[in-house]
């Protein structure tokens, strides 16, 4: 974080409490930078060996990820990342050509990118969205407006392309061409804006990015395993991996085995959390009560700043457990229905009250962040001493940084292309909204999100803002929901660049990887989705999760795609949820809380935690607080503060590796069992 200008009334460098927090952050950042190893030399991580890893993930891991998504609604997750890394690392080590840490991280990056899980249990590259579109346009909930769905998004419901279940039909030409264009523009947009955000939040503001060292530590630990004298990093990583495998056996393996063998998964540990909302509603109506029993949340608390976790937990408990029953008694929560579980309860209370408050708080965070950057830039221009103190704002040599005007120009070109594309596809939609999304809201929202990720490890988002803008525009057609509006949040990409920096990987490696990943993933996605779709309709009895859940998702999707129609009930609901007076109350509350913390010399990290916790499930924050408390009160004293700051990210990375390995093993056995069960002998 950067201080305000000297001599102003908000110069929090004079406050001892804030200085203590700043010192802790700077120590954490310095320790994280040591993760890049003693010789911090930037090298290219995308080599022939990592290209082979790209082919392995695309043509071996991807079909398994697609299948598990359709059958069970889960992806390979960390399994794809760590299995790929361990396999290639061991093969290269036994060939006496161990992988460099830069190559190991690039394998992690590639596997995480290609097997990422999307909505509706979908995974498997860009074609996954067209598989969903072909189902939705033919589904019963979409019948009233199916003919209005644009043909540039998906063929008509009676098209031979859908009856024959093939992408090799002229009706798919325009949808697939647009998909290629938007994928190219999307990559250009996030890489350019993500780099600019990284320079601002990491190089200039020096934010700690508490979760960035996790992936970096795992890559370094595996790289050091091949040394004759293994470092402390490999020992801590191995400990975390064993814990992850033991926990993963009960958390993942048993549900997968029982679900495959008996058709009904037995969950010893509730997934995703233990929900007590319905059990406590007689005493605390509308309160969201529960806790996640995922051990990973506790270990995550080891890494996140204690003040942030404490503040998030306090605000989440106060809002969703303490305040909700009071708001309900005052008649401010009207859409809640008794016997509703946590997710449905959260939707009801957010729409009735909290959504507008959350928007106002996030606007306050944006204003505070922008003000801090503006004042810092002014001081930087006015003070040579300040420039000397912040020499780290200049990129280190060899990192592969381009001149700033290049990513700025690439981002501007990509956003302009989005605007022109939307103008061509939906010419009647107000152009000023598209321009406002692309040139104003997206960079502002991305910066706020990147700043929160840099401070707390979690970003922020403003839900339903796009829906509210479409409703307010008066545009009544369905095609707007399929148009590539430049409504984007690239804040996550700042942490991605920080991870790359910590492993000593040149930024040009990411560019090379993305350039080769794009055609590779398109080819693999086209081949495997064509195979699965040709073999059986999607959804069908061959894919139980899709058959059972997709009709429900289609019903909800159909509701949202009609909210801009004048006769829609959802129209008034969304507009009521985003009322301006309540947004103003949230904004004033955020600014007032910030002034209070500054005036009484309180840690500003606690402020960011309190603001970020509004809207988060208490279920996940409570175990994180337990982990943060254990790390602060027990492990720091036992291992020493500096040692524990180094150990925690490596331990968490090892845990995810062990969890991913046991998950991959369970999925492999499940696939074998499914294959054997259909044989005639």
Image (tube, grey):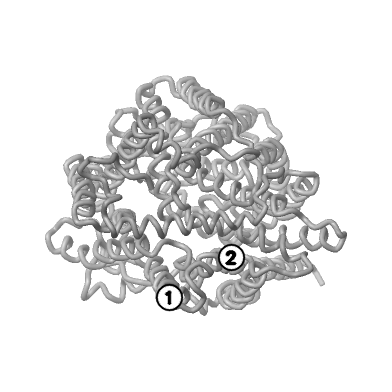
Tell which of 231 and 269 is nearer to you.
Answer: 231
Residue 19, above or below 630 = above
Mark 2 lies on a secondary structure that is helix
Residue at 86%, 60% in the rendered image: 96
* Left or right for 624, reference 112: left
Residue 574 figure quarter: top left
Which mark is on residue 124?
none
* Left or right for 470, reference 655: left
Residue 161 figure quarter: top right
Q: How far across and down, in percent of the image, does residue 36 sit?
A: 62, 54
- Farthest-out residue, right: 95
* Left or right for 509, reference 251: right
Residue 637 figure quarter: bottom left
Q: How far across and down, in percent of the image, does residue 464 sit?
A: 34, 43
Mark 1 lies on a secondary structure that is helix
Residue at 36%, 39% in the rendered image: 562
Q: How far across and down, in percent of the image, does residue 44 sit?
A: 71, 43
- Farthest-out residue, front: 385
Q: Which residue is mark 2?
A: 650
Residue 416, above or below 249 = above
Tell which of 652 and 530 is nearer to you.
Answer: 652
Name which of mark 2 and mark 1 comes first in the sequence. 1
Alpha carbon distance from label 2 to label 1: 17 Å
User: 10 Å neighbourhood of mark 2: few (<14), some, or many (≥20)?
Assistant: many
Which mark is on residue 630?
1
CB under 8 Å between discs 2 and 1 = no
Residue at 63%, 61% in the rendered image: 218
Whether residue 263 appears in this view of the structure is: no
Q: How far across and down, in percent of the image, does residue 355 sit?
A: 28, 49
Residue at 52%, 37% in the rendered image: 394
């Amino acid at each position: 974080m950067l201080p305000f200008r000297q001599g102003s009334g908000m110069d929090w460098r004079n406050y001892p409490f804030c200085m203590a927090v700043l010192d802790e952050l700077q120590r954490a950042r310095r320790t994280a930078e040591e993760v890049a190893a003693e010789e911090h030399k930037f090298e290219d991580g995308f080599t022939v060996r990592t290209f082979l890893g790209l082919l392995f993930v695309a043509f071996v891991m991807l079909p398994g990820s697609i299948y598990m998504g359709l059958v069970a609604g889960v992806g390979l997750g960390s399994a794809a990342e760590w299995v790929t890394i361990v396999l290639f690392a061991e093969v290269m080590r036994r060939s006496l050509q161990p992988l460099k840490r830069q190559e190991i991280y690039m394998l992690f990056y590639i596997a995480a990118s290609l097997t990422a899980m999307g909505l509706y249990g979908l995974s498997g590259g860009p074609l996954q969205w067209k598989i969903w579109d072909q189902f939705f346009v033919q589904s019963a909930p979409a019948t009233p407006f199916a003919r209005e769905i644009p043909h540039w998004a998906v063929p008509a419901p009676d098209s031979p392309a859908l009856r024959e279940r093939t992408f090799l039909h002229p009706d798919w030409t325009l949808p697939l061409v647009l998909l290629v264009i938007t994928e190219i523009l999307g990559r250009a947009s996030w890489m350019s804006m993500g780099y600019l955000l990284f320079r601002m939040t990491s190089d200039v503001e020096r934010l700690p990015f508490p979760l960035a060292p996790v992936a970096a530590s795992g890559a370094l630990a595996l790289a050091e395993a091949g040394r004759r004298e293994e470092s402390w990093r490999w020992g801590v990583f191995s400990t975390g991996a064993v814990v992850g495998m033991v926990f993963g056996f009960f958390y993942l393996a048993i549900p997968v085995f029982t679900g495959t063998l008996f058709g009904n998964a037995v969950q010893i540990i509730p997934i995703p959390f233990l929900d007590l909302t319905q059990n406590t509603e007689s005493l605390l109506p509308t309160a969201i009560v529960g806790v996640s029993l995922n051990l990973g949340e506790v270990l995550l608390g080891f890494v996140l700043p204690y003040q942030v976790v404490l503040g998030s937990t306090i605000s989440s408990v106060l809002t969703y457990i303490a305040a909700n029953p009071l708001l309900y008694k005052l008649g401010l929560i009207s859409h809640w229905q008794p016997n509703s579980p946590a997710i449905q309860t959260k939707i009801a209370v957010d729409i009735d009250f909290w959504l507008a408050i959350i928007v106002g708080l996030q606007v306050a965070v944006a204003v505070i962040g922008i003000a801090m950057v503006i004042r810092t830039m002014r001081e930087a221009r006015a003070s040579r001493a300040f420039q000397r103190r912040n020499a780290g704002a200049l990129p280190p040599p060899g990192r592969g940084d381009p001149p700033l005007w290049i990513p700025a120009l690439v981002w501007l070109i990509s956003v302009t292309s989005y605007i022109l594309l939307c103008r061509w596809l939906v010419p009647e939609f107000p152009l000023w909204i598209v321009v406002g999304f692309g040139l104003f809201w997206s960079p502002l929202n991305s910066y706020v999100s990147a700043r929160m990720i840099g401070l707390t490890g979690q970003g922020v988002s403003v839900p339903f803002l796009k829906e509210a803008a479409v409703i307010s525009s008066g545009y009544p057609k369905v095609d707007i929901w399929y148009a590539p509006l430049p409504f984007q949040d690239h804040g996550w990409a700042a942490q991605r660049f920080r991870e790359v920096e910590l492993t000593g990987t040149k930024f040009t490696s990411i560019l090379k990887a993305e350039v080769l990943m794009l055609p590779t993933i398109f080819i693999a996605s086209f081949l495997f989705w064509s195979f699965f779709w040709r073999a059986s309709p999607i959804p069908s009895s061959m894919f139980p999760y899709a058959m059972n859940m997709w009709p429900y998702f289609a019903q909800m999707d159909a509701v949202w795609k009609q909210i801009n129609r004048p006769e829609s009930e959802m129209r008034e609901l969304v507009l009521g949820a985003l009322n301006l007076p309540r947004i103003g109350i949230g904004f004033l509350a955020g600014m007032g809380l910030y002034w209070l913390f500054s005036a009484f010399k309180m840690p500003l990290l606690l402020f960011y935690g309190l603001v970020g916790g509004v809207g988060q499930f208490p279920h996940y924050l409570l175990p994180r607080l337990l982990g943060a408390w254990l790390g602060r009160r027990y492990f720091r004293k036992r291992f020493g503060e500096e040692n524990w700051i180094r150990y925690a990210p490596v331990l968490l990375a090892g845990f995810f590796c062990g969890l991913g390995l046991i998950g991959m093993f369970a999925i492999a056995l499940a696939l074998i069992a499914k294959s054997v069960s259909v044989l005639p002998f």
